[in-house]
Image (cartoon, rainbow, N blue to C red):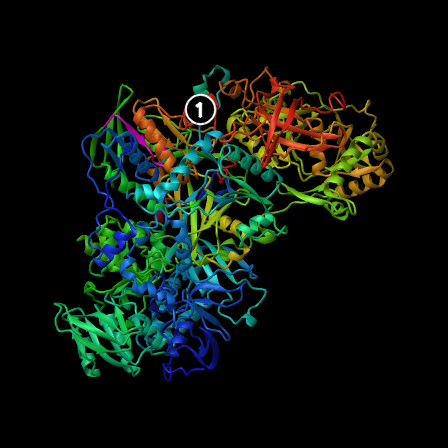
C-alpha cells in the first residue's frame, strides 16, 4: 500500500486518497473555439509517463484537499508534493535524496 | 490465402512414440531468433495479441518476413498474468463483432495451432444483484441474442443449479437475483496460447526475438523507417505496437498521445483443491470474478488499482477487498487459502474498449487499451490487427476502434460489460 | 492404538504428562502436547502421509516446517470447518484432532491413481499440450477427468462459522523470525525504547536452536535453551516489544507495509477455543525498518527415487530428535555435501540410531568431523554420493557410488538423511523485488540490500556459523533502530565452520525436483529441449515450484538442473519471481471483519423504523435501504404498487425522500459555479425559487440530475440522485479546487442532516395546511418550484414545492432527528385524506407517467441532454461542463438514440426493461439489427395501460411510427413511438 505524502496531513495510507490522474490539465477557457481534435485532446488524451509523472491526489478521508505530486510510476516513489496551481518543482539531486526514497523496492 | 504451418506434429501418437523412445525426438517449439537488419513488419510485444498478429500476418496475408520483438521472455507480460476468461457477451454491436470473432477463432484454435490450449467452454455467469443490474444485464443478454452471441438469462435458482457453491440467500448485502449465462464462455490455458501461436508463427517463418527491447522508433517525414532496439537497429516500414500496459510508452516514441492510462491490475489464486467451481462467475457489483483452474486453484481477479503505475505491483487492500467480495458470493471459501497474488499493468481506455488503429504516423499501428479484458479477444484482436497492418486499412470489425472516435465522440461504451468498472 | 515406537526415551519439548489421541487415515494414534502431526506420526512409525499430485507416488515428511512440500493433509471432517492442504509439519497436535490423507482413492495404502506412475513415460511434462486437441479426443471430454485427478484437498462446503480480524500497527522495527538471530536483533533495537514487533512462525521462539541439543552450543556462557528462556523473558519484560508466535510474515509491500498472519486458535482442541477470539488475525504493520531473521531452507539432494518416504532433510531430522524426541528411523544413511549434516549423524548416533554411512560428496571432509565419526564408529564414504533410494514404497536402502561412478554399494537403511546445503530464506524479501546475488562459496543466493529499509539477521544474512549469525543480528537490530550494536552475544560451539561443495549431480533414474508437483529432472530437460529455456518458461511448462509450497525446497534444484541442462551457471539462469504470500493465508484472514453484515454498509433513513413496522419490501439504492412498496396483508407486490400509485393521483401519498443527495452550496460565486456545472442557466434564479438541472461530464453525457433551490443570493440547496450523491460532491469539489480555485464556493454534504417526507396528490394541500404552523400551503400562495422555511409543531422545516410525480407536492425537510416523528405525524394526520405511503417502485412508475427521467436508468453514460429531448435545459448563454462535446460530429448526429415514449399495441402488454427494439416485425435468422432499447416500463394504473420509455435511433423524429420489441421465444411486440409525457397537460407547471 502506497504511503502518500499529503502536504497538509503528512504521510497517510493510500486508502485515504482519491486519485486524480494527470496534473496540469487546464480546462480550455473557450472550448467552442477548439476543433474536435483539440477538444478530444483535453477530454481524453493523457500523458501516461513511465517515470517521473505529475499527478493529482485528493485526501478525501483527511483534509479533502486536492494537491499535486511528482511520482516515479516505474517505482511508485513519491518525489515531491505541491499545491494546486503551483508549478512542479525542479527535481535536482537534492530533492531526490530528500524524497522518501523507496529503498526496499528501488 | 491461408498457409499451413509445417511443424513436427503433436498428437497422442507422437506422445506414445516419444514415450517409448525416451522423449528424445522433441524439438524446440519455436526458434529463439536473433534480430535481422530488416523486416517487412516489426511487431512490438511478444504476448498473446502480438504473437497472434504475427501468426495471422503470415497465415492470412503471406507476410512472413516479420519479427516479433519481446523485451523479456515470451508471454511474460499480461499474457502470463490474466485470469484467462473467454466470453463475448458485450453490449454494443461493435463489441459483439470483435469478441465473437475471437470466440469463433478460439473454438478451433487448439487444432489449428496443433497445441492444446485447453479451451474449456464451461460457461460464464454474470450476476445481477439489484434492479438496476437486472435491467442492464437483461438489456445485454437480449442484445447478445439478437447479435447472434449465445446468451441466456437464469434466475437465482437456476444460477445455483449451474454453480452449486454460490450463495443465493437473500440475507446478504448483494443477493444474487439472476444472471446471464454464456455457455460458450469459459477459460483456457494462457501459456499454451502464447506458446501455440509462437510455434505456429515460427513454423511459417516469423522471427521471434526475446530479450530485445525497443528503445526508439525512427520516423522520417511522418513515415516509419525502423526501430531501435537493445539488440541493434532494424529497418522496417511497418511497426505494430501490441504492448499491453506500455502502449503509451511506445506511442511516445513517435510523439503520440493516447487516451490511455496504465494501471496495476491484480489477480490471485488459492491453493489447489478438488473440483468445486464448475464455471466462471463474474459480478460487477461486488467486484469479483472467479473460476477454478484445471490444476484446482481458484483463480480470482481483482479490480484495477486507481493510480497509474508500471510497477506491476498493486496494493494489498485491493486483494483484501477482492477476497471479501468473493466471500460475499461464496462464504464456503473462507477457509480456503490465498496461495499467490500478483499484478500486471493494463492500458485503460475511457470507454472500456480497445484501440486498433492507424495513427498519424504512416506505418505505425496501435493495438492496445484493452483494459482488464484483453485476453478473451486475443485471436480476434490478432486477426483484425494483422489485416490492418497488411492492408493499411481497418476491416469492418476493426474500424470502430480507430483513434478518431475520441474526436468524433463515437465511443464504444462498455463499462457495464467490461466486468471491472474503470 | 499403536505404541510410539520411534519416540525417544526422553528429551524434546513435548509434554509427556499430557498424552493426546488423534486420528489419521481412519486410525487412532497417541502423541503428546507439543507434537506436530508430523512428529506424532513419525513417532508412531507412520511415514507415508500423502500421495503425490500427478503420479500418486507415496510421499512422507521431508521437512519440519512451513517449507514442507508433500506432507499435506485435510484437517477435520466437518463440511464447515474442514481445511485442505495443511502441512502436517506445522500442524500442532491437539486432543481429538482428525486428519485425512489427500489425493488418494480408495485409501492412502491402496490408491488406484498410482497407475499414472506406471504410465509416467507417456505423461511427460506438458503432455496435455500435445493431445486432446480435437475430436474425438477433445479437451472438454478429458478435462473433467484431468480436473478430478488434480486438485489436492477438498474445499469446505458449508459457510465458515469462525471470525477473523485485522490488526493495524505502526512500529519502528519489525523483526520477522524468532530464532536466536531474531531475538538478538529485537533486543538490540528495543534498547532504544523503539516499538519492536517480532513475529515467529511456530509456537515457540528459538528457531534453529530448538533443532539442536539443549546444550549443543553456549551463548553468553549459557546453554542454548537456557539462554533462549532468558532472552525471551528479557524481551517480554520490555513494554514496547510485541512478541508474536504462530505468526508468519506473509507479504512485504510498498514502503515497509508488511502483513503478518497469526493463527490464534487452530492449535487448540475445538472445545478449548475461546469464542471471543478470532480464528486468525492478519496484522497489517507499517514498519520504519524491517529485520529479516527468516533463517535458511535446506536443499534436498537429487538422486533416483529421492521422493520415497524416509528421505528427510538433515536439519529436519535434527529437529525431530531434539524438539520432539522422535528418531524417524532405526538405521540411517546421511548423505550430504556440507559440514552441517554431520551433526545430524552424530545426534542420531547419540540417540541410538544406527548410522549405516555418512556419505559426503566432498573428497576431503573436515578433519574434526572425520575424527568424531571415527570416535563414534560411524562409517564414512567421502567423495561419494547417494545415487538412488531403494524400497518399493518407503526407503529400504540407499545406493552409494563414488563421484566417478565406481564403487557402487547397496546399504540397507530405513532413513535417508539428505542435505544439499542451506540457502538463506529470502522469499519475503525477494517478493518485493529486493535484490539478491549468487554466492559461489555459499552455493546459494544471498541478499543484496540496496537500501536501509531491509536488514538481515542470522542465516537469512548468509551467516551460517552461529557466532557470525548473531553478530549480524545484533548489527541489524541496532542499525534498524539507528544505533550501534552493544550486546553481541558470545558463542561457543563445536568450532566446525560451515563449508560445502556444489551439490552432486544426479546419476539418472527418476529424480524428483519438485516433490509436490511431481517434476523430475527429465521434465526440466525436456522443457529445455523444447525451447522452454527461460526459467519462467521451464517453470510454467513443468509446473515446477507452482504448488502450495511455492518451490521453497525445489526452486534451487530446479534452477540448478536447468543450468546444468543449458550448460549455464545458476546465476545466469536466475530465479523465478517470488510472489506473496510467503505461505498460504486463509481467505477469511485476508478479508478480516469485512464480510457478512460488515461487507458493505447498508444505510437506513431516520424513518426506517416506521417502514419496517408498515411491512415495507426494501431495495438497496446505492447503499441505502429504501422501501420499495408497502404490501398490505395478503396483497401482491404488483397490487400494492398499483394501489399506491392510484392513491398518489387520487388522494394523497407520502414518500421517504431522505436519501436524495443534498449539498449545501454557499459563497459569493455559488451562482456562477452552478451555472458552470449544470447544463441550464442559473444566473437569474431568485431566492425562494427552485430549478431542475442536468449535469454532464466533459464528454457531454448526462450523469446526474436534481433540483436546486436558491436559499439566498449566495446560498443554494442542491439535490442529487440517491446513488450519485457522493460522486457528485467529489466531482464538484474537484472542479472547484483544481479548475476554478478563484471561485469562492463552499460545499457541504447535508444528506444526513435532513430527513425528507414528500407528500403529493390532490389532497396533499389540505394535509400540508394542517401540518404547517406558519406556512400557507395553498398551491397558489406557495407555488410550484418555490420553497420556504417554517415550522411544524415548532420544529423548523424547509419545504420545497417540487414534484417528481407531476402531482401537487410538498417536500418537507426536517432536521434528521425529527424524521421519524414527522413520518408518524404525517401518517396520523393524513389518514383521513387516504394518505398512502409509497415506495421507490411507485415513485418510478409515477414519474414515468410524466416522462421524467431517472439518471442511470433512462441514461447509461451515452446519452446527452439533447438525446433526452431536454434542449430546454441546455443554455446557449455560457459554457458548461460537457457543452463542447455536444457539437462533435457523432454527438450532433440526428439519428442518435433518443428518449421516446412507447405504447404497446396491446395495452395490457408490459414490456421488459432492457428489451431491445427492432425496426422489423420479425427477428431475422442471423443477426437482427437493433435500433434501441426499453429503459423503463410499467403498467400505469392512472392510464389503465402499459407505458414505457425507450432510447431509439432517431426517435424524436419518429413519433407515431411503429417499432417492435424483441422477446426471446416469442414474436416481437409492436409498439408506437409517443411523447415521453403520458399525462401531458396534467400536473403542475412552473
Furthest residue in direction bottom, as rendered: C9
Is residue C618 in view from this perspective?
A: yes
**Residue nearest the observer in this picture, C900 or C630:** C900
Q: Is residue C366 left or right of residue C945?
A: left
Q: Residue at image x 53%, y 57%?
A: B332
Over which residues does the magenta segment extend? Answer: B236-247
**Residue nearest the observer in this picture, C929 or C584:** C929
- Identify whether C320 is placed above or below C963: below
In what quadrant of the picture does the N terminus of chain C appear?
Answer: bottom left
Magenta-span inclusion, residue C374: no
Magenta-colored segment: predominant secondary structure: loop
Image coordinates of residue C446 in percent, x first then y, are: 27, 57
Q: Secondary structure at mark 1?
A: helix
The residue to which callout 1 is attached is B405
**Residue nearest the observer in this picture, C490 or B204:** B204
Is residue C172 in view from this perspective?
A: no
**Residue nearest the observer in this picture, C331 or C530:** C530
Image coordinates of residue C152 in percent, x first then y, are: 41, 61
Magenta-span inclusion, residue B245: yes
In what quadrant of the picture does the C terminus of chain C appear?
Answer: top right
The image quadrant that residue C447 belongs to is bottom left
Image coordinates of residue C746 in percent, x first then y, are: 61, 31
The image quadrant that residue C901 belongs to is top right
The image quadrant that residue C153 belongs to is bottom left
Q: Residue at image x 31%, y 78%?
A: C329
Instruction: Tell which subunit mark 1 falls on.
Output: B
Image coordinates of residue C669 in percent, x first then y, are: 61, 24
Q: Is residue C184 left or right of residue A1?
A: left
Amino acid at each position: 500500500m502506497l504511503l502518500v505524502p499529503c502536504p497538509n496531513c503528512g504521510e497517510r495510507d493510500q486508502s485515504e486518497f482519491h486519485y486524480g490522474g494527470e496534473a496540469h490539465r487546464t480546462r480550455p477557457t473557450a472550448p467552442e473555439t477548439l476543433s474536435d481534435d483539440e477538444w478530444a485532446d483535453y477530454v481524453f488524451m493523457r500523458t501516461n509517463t513511465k517515470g517521473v509523472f505529475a499527478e493529482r491526489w485528493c485526501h478525501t478521508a483527511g483534509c479533502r484537499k486536492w494537491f499535486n505530486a511528482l511520482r516515479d510510476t516505474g517505482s511508485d516513489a513519491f518525489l515531491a508534493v505541491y499545491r494546486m496551481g503551483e508549478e512542479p518543482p525542479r527535481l535536482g539531486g537534492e530533492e531526490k535524496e530528500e524524497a522518501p526514497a523507496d529503498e526496499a523496492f528501488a | 490465402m491461408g498457409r499451413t504451418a509445417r511443424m513436427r506434429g503433436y498428437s497422442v501418437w507422437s506422445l506414445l512414440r516419444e514415450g517409448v523412445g525416451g522423449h528424445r525426438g522433441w524439438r524446440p517449439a519455436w526458434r529463439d531468433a536473433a534480430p535481422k537488419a530488416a523486416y517487412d513488419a516489426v511487431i512490438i510485444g511478444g504476448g498473446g495479441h502480438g504473437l497472434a498478429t504475427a501468426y495471422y500476418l503470415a497465415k492470412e496475408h503471406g507476410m512472413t518476413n516479420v519479427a516479433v520483438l519481446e523485451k523479456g521472455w515470451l508471454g511474460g507480460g499480461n499474457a502470463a498474468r490474466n485470469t484467462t476468461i473467454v466470453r463475448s457477451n458485450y453490449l454494443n454491436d461493435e463489441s459483439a463483432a470483435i469478441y465473437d470473432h475471437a470466440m469463433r477463432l478460439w473454438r478451433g484454435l487448439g487444432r489449428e495451432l496443433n497445441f492444446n490450449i485447453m479451451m474449456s467452454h464451461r460457461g460464464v455467469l454474470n450476476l445481477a444483484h439489484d434492479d438496476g443490474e437486472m435491467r442492464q444485464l437483461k438489456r445485454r443478454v437480449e442484445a447478445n441474442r439478437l447479435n447472434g452471441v449465445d446468451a441466456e438469462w437464469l434466475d437465482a435458482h437456476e444460477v445455483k443449479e449451474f454453480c452449486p457453491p454460490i450463495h443465493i440467500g437473500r440475507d446478504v448485502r448483494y443477493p444474487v437475483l439472476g444472471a446471464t449465462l454464456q455457455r460458450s464462455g469459459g477459460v483456457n490455458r494462457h501459456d499454451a496460447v502464447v506458446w501455440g501461436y509462437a510455434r505456429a508463427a515460427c513454423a511459417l517463418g516469423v522471427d521471434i526475438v526475446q530479450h530485445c527491447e525497443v528503445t526508439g522508433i525512427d520516423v522520417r517525414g511522418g513515415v516509419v523507417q525502423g526501430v531501435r532496439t537493445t539488440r541493434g537497429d532494424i529497418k522496417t516500414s511497418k511497426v505494430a505496437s501490441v504492448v499491453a500496459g506500455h502502449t503509451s510508452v511506445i506511442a511516445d516514441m513517435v510523439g503520440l498521445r493516447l487516451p490511455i492510462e496504465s494501471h496495476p491490475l491484480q489477480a490471485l489464486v488459492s491453493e489447489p483443491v478438488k473440483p468445486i467451481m464448475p464455471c466462471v462467475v463474474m459480478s460487477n457489483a461486488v467486484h469479483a470474478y472467479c473460476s477454478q483452474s484445471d490444476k484446482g486453484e481458484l483463480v480470482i481477479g481483482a479490480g484495477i488499482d486507481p493510480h497509474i503505475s508500471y510497477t506491476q505491483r498493486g496494493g494489498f487492500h485491493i486483494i483484501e477487498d477482492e477476497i471479501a467480495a468473493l466471500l460475499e458470493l461464496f462464504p464456503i471459501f473462507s477457509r480456503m487459502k490465498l496461495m499467490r497474488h500478483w499484478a500486471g499493468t493494463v492500458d485503460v481506455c475511457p470507454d472500456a474498449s480497445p484501440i486498433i488503429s492507424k495513427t498519424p504516423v504512416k506505418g505505425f499501428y496501435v493495438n492496445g487499451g484493452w483494459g482488464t479484458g484483453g485476453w478473451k479477444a486475443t485471436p480476434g484482436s490478432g486477426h483484425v490487427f494483422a489485416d490492418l497492418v497488411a492492408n493499411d486499412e481497418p476491416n469492418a470489425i476493426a474500424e470502430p476502434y480507430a483513434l478518431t472516435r475520441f474526436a468524433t465522440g463515437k465511443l464504444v461504451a462498455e463499462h457495464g460489460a467490461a466486468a471491472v468498472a474503470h | 492404538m499403536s505404541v510410539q515406537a520411534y519416540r525417544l526415551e526422553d528429551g524434546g519439548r513435548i509434554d509427556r504428562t499430557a498424552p493426546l489421541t488423534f486420528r489419521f487415515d481412519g486410525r487412532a494414534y497417541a502423541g503428546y502436547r507439543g507434537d506436530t502431526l508430523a512428529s506424532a506420526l513419525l513417532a508412531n512409525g507412520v511415514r507415508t502421509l500423502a500421495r503425490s499430485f500427478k503420479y500418486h507416488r507415496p510421499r512422507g515428511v521431508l521437512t519440519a516446517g512451513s517449507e514442507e512440500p508433500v506432507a499435506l493433509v485435510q484437517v477435520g471432517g466437518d463440511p464447515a470447518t474442514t481445511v485442505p492442504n495443511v502441512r502436517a509439519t506445522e500442524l500442532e497436535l491437539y486432543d481429538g484432532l482428525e486428519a485425512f490423507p489427500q489425493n488418494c482413492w480408495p485409501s492412502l495404502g491402496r490408491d488406484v491413481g498410482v497407475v499414472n506412475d506406471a504410465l509416467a513415460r507417456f505423461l511427460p511434462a506438458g503432455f496435455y499440450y500435445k493431445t486432446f486437441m480435437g475430436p474425438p479426443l477433445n479437451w472438454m471430454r478429458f478435462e473433467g477427468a484431468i480436473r478430478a485427478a488434480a486438485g489436492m484437498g477438498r474445499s469446505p462446503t458449508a459457510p465458515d462459522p469462525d471470525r477473523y480480524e485485522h490488526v493495524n500497527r505502526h512500529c519502528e522495527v519489525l523483526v520477522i523470525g524468532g530464532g536466536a538471530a531474531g531475538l538478538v536483533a529485537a533486543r538490540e533495537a528495543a534498547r532504544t525504547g523503539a516499538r519492536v514487533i517480532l513475529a515467529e512462525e511456530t509456537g515457540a521462539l528459538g528457531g534453529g536452536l530448538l533443532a539442536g541439543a539443549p546444550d549443543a552450543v553456549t551463548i553468553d556462557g549459557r546453554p542454548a535453551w537456557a539462554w533462549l528462556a532468558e532472552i525471551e523473558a528479557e524481551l517480554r519484560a520490555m513494554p514496547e516489544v510485541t512478541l508474536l508466535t504462530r505468526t508468519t510474515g506473509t507479504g512485504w509491500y510498498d514502503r515497509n507495509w508488511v502483513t503478518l498472519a497469526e493463527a490464534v486458535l487452530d492449535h487448540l482442541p475445538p472445545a478449548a477455543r475461546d469464542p471471543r477470539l478470532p480464528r486468525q488475525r492478519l496484522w497489517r504493520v507499517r514498519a520504519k525498518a524491517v529485520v529479516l531473521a527468516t533463517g535458511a531452507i535446506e536443499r534436498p539432494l537429487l538422486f533416483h527415487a529421492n521422493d520415497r518416504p524416509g528421505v528427510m532433510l538433515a536439519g529436519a531430522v535434527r529437529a525431530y530428535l531434539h524438539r520432539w524426541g522422535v528418531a524417524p528411523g532405526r538405521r540411517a544413511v546421511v548423505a550430504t555435501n556440507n559440514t552441517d549434516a554431520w551433526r545430524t549423524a552424530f545426534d542420531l548416533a547419540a540417540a541410538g540410531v544406527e548410522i549405516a554411512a555418512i556419505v559426503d560428496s566432498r573428497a576431503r571432509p573436515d578433519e574434526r568431523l572425520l575424527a568424531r565419526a571415527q570416535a563414534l564408529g560411524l562409517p564414512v564414504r567421502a567423495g561419494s554420493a547417494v545415487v538412488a533410494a531403494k524400497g518399493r514404497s518407503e526407503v529400504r536402502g540407499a545406493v552409494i557410488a563414488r563421484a566417478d561412478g565406481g564403487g557402487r554399494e547397496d546399504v540397507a537403511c530405513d532413513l535417508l538423511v539428505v542435505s544439499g546445503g542451506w540457502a538463506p530464506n529470502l522469499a519475503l524479501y525477494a517478493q518485493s523485488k529486493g535484490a539478491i546475488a549468487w554466492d559461489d562459496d555459499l552455493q546459494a543466493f544471498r541478499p543484496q540490500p540496496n537500501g536501509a529499509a531491509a536488514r538481515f539477521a542470522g542465516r537469512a544474512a548468509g551467516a551460517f556459523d552461529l557466532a557470525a549469525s548473531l553478530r549480524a543480528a545484533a548489527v541489524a537490530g541496532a542499525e534498524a533502530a539507528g544505533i550501534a550494536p552493544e550486546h553481541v552475544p558470545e558463542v561457543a560451539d563445536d568450532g566446525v565452520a560451515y563449508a560445502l561443495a556444489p551439490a552432486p549431480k544426479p546419476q539418472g533414474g527418476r529424480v524428483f525436483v519438485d516433490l509436490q508437483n511431481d517434476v523430475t529432472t527429465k521434465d526440466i530437460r525436456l522443457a529445455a529441449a523444447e525451447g522452454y529455456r527461460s526459467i519462467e518458461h521451464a517453470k510454467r511448462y513443468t509446473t515446477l515450484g507452482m504448488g502450495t509450497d511455492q518451490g521453497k525446497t525445489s526452486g534451487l534444484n530446479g534452477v540448478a538442473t536447468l543450468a546444468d541442462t543449458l550448460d549455464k551457471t545458476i546465476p545466469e539462469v536466475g530465479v523465478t519471481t517470488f510472489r506473496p504470500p510467503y505461505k498460504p493465508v486463509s481467505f477469511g484472514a485476508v478479508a478480516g471483519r469485512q464480510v457478512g453484515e460488515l461487507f458493505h454498509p447498508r444505510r437506513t433513513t431516520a424513518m426506517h423504523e416506521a417502514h419496517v413496522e408498515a411491512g415495507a419490501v426494501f431495495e438497496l439504492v446505492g447503499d441505502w435501504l429504501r422501501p420499495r412498496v408497502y404490501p398490505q396483508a395478503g396483497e401482491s407486490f404488483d397490487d400494492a404498487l398499483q394501489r399506491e400509485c392510484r392513491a398518489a393521483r387520487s388522494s394523497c401519498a407520502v414518500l421517504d425522500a431522505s436519501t436524495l443527495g443534498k449539498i449545501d452550496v454557499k459563497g459569493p460565486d455559488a451562482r456562477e459555479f452552478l451555472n458552470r456545472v449544470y447544463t441550464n442557466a442559473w444566473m437569474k434564479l431568485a431566492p425562494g425559487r427552485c430549478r431542475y438541472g442536468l449535469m454532464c461530464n466533459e464528454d457531454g453525457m448526462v450523469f446526474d440530475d436534481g433540483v436546486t433551490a436558491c436559499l439566498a443570493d449566495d446560498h443554494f440547496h442542491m439535490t442529487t440522485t440517491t446513488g450519485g450523491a457522493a460522486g457528485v460532491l467529489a466531482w464538484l469539489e474537484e472542479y472547484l479546487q483544481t479548475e476554478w480555485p478563484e471561485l469562492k464556493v463552499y460545499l457541504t454534504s447535508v444528506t444526513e442532516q435532513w430527513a425528507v417526507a414528500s407528500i403529493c396528490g390532490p389532497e396533499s394541500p389540505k394535509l400540508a395546511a394542517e401540518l404547517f404552523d406558519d406556512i400557507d400551503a395553498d398551491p397558489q400562495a406557495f407555488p410550484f418550484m418555490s420553497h420556504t422555511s417554517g415550522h411544524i409543531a415548532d420544529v423548523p422545516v424547509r419545504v420545497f414545492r417540487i414534484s417528481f410525480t407531476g402531482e401537487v407536492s410538498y417536500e418537507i425537510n426536517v432536521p434528521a432527528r425529527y424524521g421519524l416523528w414527522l413520518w408518524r405525524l404525517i401518517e396520523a394526520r393524513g389518514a383521513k385524506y387516504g394518505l398512502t405511503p409509497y415506495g421507490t417502485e411507485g415513485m418510478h412508475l409515477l414519474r414515468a407517467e410524466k416522462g421524467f427521467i431517472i439518471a442511470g436508468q433512462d441514461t447509461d453514460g451515452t446519452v446527452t441532454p439533447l438525446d433526452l429531448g431536454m434542449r430546454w435545459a441546455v443554455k446557449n448563454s455560457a459554457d458548461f461542463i460537457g457543452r463542447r462535446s455536444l457539437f462533435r460530429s457523432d454527438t450532433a448526429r440526428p439519428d442518435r438514440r433518443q428518449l421516446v415514449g412507447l405504447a404497446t399495441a396491446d395495452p395490457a402488454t408490459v414490456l421488459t426493461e432492457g428489451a431491445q427494439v427492432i425496426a422489423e416485425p420479425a427477428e431475422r435468422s442471423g443477426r437482427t439489427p437493433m435500433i434501441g432499447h426499453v429503459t423503463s416500463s410499467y403498467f400505469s394504473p392512472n392510464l389503465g395501460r402499459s407505458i414505457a420509455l425507450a432510447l431509439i435511433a432517431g426517435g424524436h423524429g419518429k413519433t407515431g411510427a411503429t417499432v417492435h420489441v424483441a422477446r426471446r421465444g416469442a414474436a416481437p411486440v409492436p409498439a408506437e413511438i409517443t411523447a415521453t409525457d403520458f399525462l401531458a397537460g396534467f400536473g403542475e407547471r412552473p
